[in-house]
Amino acid sequence: MKILLPPVGGSAVNNGRKYFMRVTLKRDGGDFPVPGLNHPVTLDTDTLPADKASKLEGLVAATHFFALPAVVGTPKVGAVGYFTYQITVDEGHQCHTVELSDFTEEPALVALRDYLQE
């Protein structure tokens, strides 16, 4: 049984939900920097529509995010022009950041990264 704790400094119920989750994606690298392309993206289940919040929570759960190491996968030797990504998940009572790259092969983590880039 998982106990959901209320967010720090927030209410126990946000937008009809038991807790909040804030997920941030930062992207660096690539061959040709494009202005505005590498700005962080943050999704917050407290402000998302319920269906999108549920999808985000499901993608995070599928990765077992809080059990992942700080770095998942490594670039291939001699690789150039690839992106690195930092995904941070904050649930108020716990926060974790994972770094990955275009070479990461964990399907659930790739699905989360791709959803955050949509």
Image (tube, grey):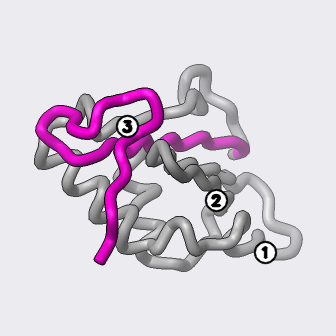
Q: Is residue 14 above or below residue 19?
A: above
Residue 112 part of the magenta segment = no
Identify which amino acid the numbered label 2 is placed on. Val
Mark sitting on residue 76: 1
Residue 54 shown left or right of residue 24 in the figure: left
Q: Residue at x 69, y 74 (%)?
A: 73
Segment colored magenta? 1-29
- Give the secondary structure at mark 3: strand
Q: CA distance from mark 2 to mark 3?
A: 16 Å
Q: Is residue 62 above or below residue 23?
A: below
- Outermost residue, right direction? 78
| Disc 2 crowd, CA 10 A, few/some/many (<14, 14-19, 20+) | some
- Give the secondary structure at mark 2: strand
Q: Earlier in the sequence, mark 1 or mark 2?
A: 1
Residue 57 shown left or right of residue 32 in the figure: left
Q: Residue at x 87, y 69 (%)?
A: 78
Residue 106 shown left or right of residue 29 in the figure: left
Q: Earlier in the sequence, mark 2 or mark 3?
A: 3
Residue located beneath label 3 in the image: 43
| Disc 1 crowd, CA 10 A, few/some/many (<14, 14-19, 20+) | few
Mark sitting on residue 84: none
Residue located beneath label 2 in the image: 98
Where does residue 74 sit, x and y in percent of width and height?
76, 72
**Count of numbered circles on the image:** 3
| Location of the N terminus (image quadrant) | bottom left
Identify which amino acid the numbered label 1 is placed on. Lys
